[in-house]
Image (cartoon, coloured by chain):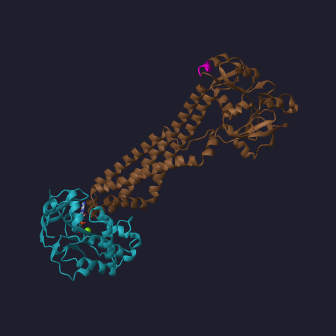
Chain colours: A cyan, B brown
Amino acid sequence: MRIVLNGLEKSFLDPSGNRRRVISAISADIAPGALVAVTGPSGAGKTTFFNLVSGLFLPDSGTITADKTELTALSERERDRWRAKEVGYIFQTFNLLSDLSIIDNVVLPHILIGNGAKGDLEKRAEESLTALGIGDHLRKYPHQLSVGQRQRVAVARALLVSPRIIIADEPTANLDDASARIVADAILTLRGRSTVFLASHDGRFNAVKPDHTIALGGEVSPCVR
Amino acid sequence: MRKVNALLTLVFASLKGRLFATTVSILAVAAALAVVAVTGIVSFAIAKQAFESGQKYPFIVAAEGASETQIILSTIFHIDKPRGKIPFDTYESLKKDPRVTTAFPIAMADSIGVFPIIGTDGAFVKDIGATYRGDIALADPHDAVLGATVARQLLMDIGAEFTGTHGMGGSADEAHEHAGHTYTVKGILDPTGGPEDAAAYTSYKAVWAIHAHGEHHEEGDHHGEDHDRYHLSDGMLTAVMARTANPVQVFDLQQEYSRPGLTTVNTANAVRSFQKYFNTAGLVATFFAGLTLLIAAALILAITLMALDARLRELALLRILGIGRGAIALLIMLETLIVTVAGVLLGFLLGHGIPALFAKAIGALVGASIEPWHIGANELPAIIGALLLGQAVALIAMLRAYHMNLVEESGKN
Ligand SMILES: Nc1ncnc2c1ncn2[C@@H]1O[C@H](COP(=O)(O)OP(=O)(O)OP(=O)(O)O)[C@@H](O)[C@H]1O
Ligand SMILES: [Mg+2]
């Protein structure tokens, strides 16, 4: 999916009531299947950027266009639908629903957002979880799994319906080495098929050269409204 | 459809995940409604019994000095002592009266164990309408008929013999055995659920025989007035119950028999004030049940809102996965709704199931046969109230979930 970012701006009110610009003048034309590295120190706005690209909320100004769809012109509901169909999201922590079994964690959200039928999704989920090395834990609950195993479940969920956009926000942080390698491989093999946005401090990703790098500023610039 | 299934799976998973809170909430609603149900069943049973008594024995004459309630409790329900005696000719004149279709003599002085012995005649026992074994004519002063509970608890069958104890199941110093007069059980009534289960019946003539000439205890045994009250000598009764051809005639009889030494009772009228009392009692119980219900609702609201805050991250996760605000609000509303509906169902089952299981014991306790599946007047409003309250709580939780800024909050992680 080709994604065109045009002059994105986003600011927040900080606790003392001042408006702080987190995303400032970001433009890019990203080809389908590209790997996009999003860099910047903590607090630079990486997560904020991802939330804009996935349509979770709107920029203060600027546009995002995904293929023919102008995301920034859609309503919240339309953006929810679009995200459900097009975006696979993997983030650092709190990826799973603690009350659901592993298999339900992978499948249920997709049923809820209308991404397919239960039987078919479950079959695919089993295959994918088995490939990720947690085929034996399908009926267990998140608290019974290690952090690394849990992140692999999140990967299986994000990739289940082959979304055209993958967003990975520090996907390997805090993981044991084996899990980190599995997660990193799973994400990198998508390159070429899905457009992958990746923010990571993990050296494992240093070997690959991204197609784009979006560098977010270290300092959050105060702005006057 | 599959979306609905998925949503319900999520709802039940989350209710299960908070099993303790869910259980407490359901039980709180159930307890409140069960109280209303049981109150309704019991007060209905008593009111019905009282009403039927009013139909069956519309006119009662007893001794002066007793209240209408005391008279009804002692003559119809056998749960209070008679307060004095009346001459036998009251019975005879009522029996002869053309307006009176049936009159029954009642002489209560003795007891067997904790159960009262009702001195009367065979016609009265027959009039109870219970099925029975043996013979219930009370033809001889030594014949006795037992209620089902009396026979069962005292392990007595037809042919068994017993002697009465003086006094109405009273205290030890008041009671003494009438060893001289032995009764033989001639008949046993089948259980009815009514007051007759816990009574024994003999001829009033037996009561006279015992107290007038049959036996004399030592002078020291006399306890003044109190003893004298039960000391029915020849020609005395404790009450007469009568039925008229026309209910209006009860008023005439009441006027005519209002003379010194007598108290007259228009049972139907008296029972009406009874019912008022039970309605008030039911209302008080319902008020407390309503209070419990309100507390339950507040509890559920607090639990739901607390859980909502604790689940902020999970709900945000659902949003990030593309699940809309509406679906999340629906999820929260369904959770609350399921808790209330489960509480209502459980309350109904407990409130009627427990009376159904223990119908006999409860019936014996209140002296009236209960209908465990009777839905009392206050029950339906209570159920509707519970559902509405649940709906209100669900709505508050839903609105809160809908307007929670899940995504931006998650951006702070
Ligand atoms: N909803 C919000 N309200 C106010 N400020 C916010 C909000 N979301 C993010 N911010 C602020 O925006 C800035 C960027 O936050 P963001 O989470 O995007 O950074 P990040 O690059 O992902 O950091 P990290 O590497 O620590 O995850 C921070 O200063 C943060 O406090
Ligand atoms: Mg971040």
The image shows residue B307 at horizontal and vertical percentages of 38, 57
- Residue B288 spot, x, y in % from top left: 50, 41
Image-based side of B83 in relation to B331, left or right = right
Tell whether position B253 is magenta.
no
Q: Quick check: A6 left or right of B167? A: left
In the figure, residue B206 lies in which quadrant? top right
Residue depicted at 34% across the width and 67% down the height = A105
Of B43 and A43, nearer the camera is B43
Residue A51 image point, x, y percent:
22, 64
Q: Residue at 70% across / 42% down in the picture?
A: B148
Task: State which quarter of the image contains the N terminus of chain B.
Answer: bottom left
Number of residue marks: 0
Relative to A167, say whether B121 is above or below. above
Q: Is residue B212 visible?
A: yes
Q: Is residue B173 visible?
A: no
Q: Nearer the viewer, residue B310 or B331?
A: B331
- The magenta stretch is B247-251
Picture quadrant where residue B82 is located: top right
Q: Main secondary structure of the magenta part?
A: helix
Q: Which residue reaches farthest front?
A: B134
Query: Taking B135 as reference, is B327 left or right?
Result: left
Name the residue nearer the viewer: B292 or A85.
A85
User: Which quadrant would the C terminus of chain B be assigned to in this image?
Assistant: bottom left
Side (left or right) of B244 relative to A1 = right
Using the image as rendered, state which of residue B56 and residue A12 is in the foreground: B56
Instruction: Specify the quadrant of the image occupied by residue B127.
Output: top right
Residue furthest to the bottom: A207
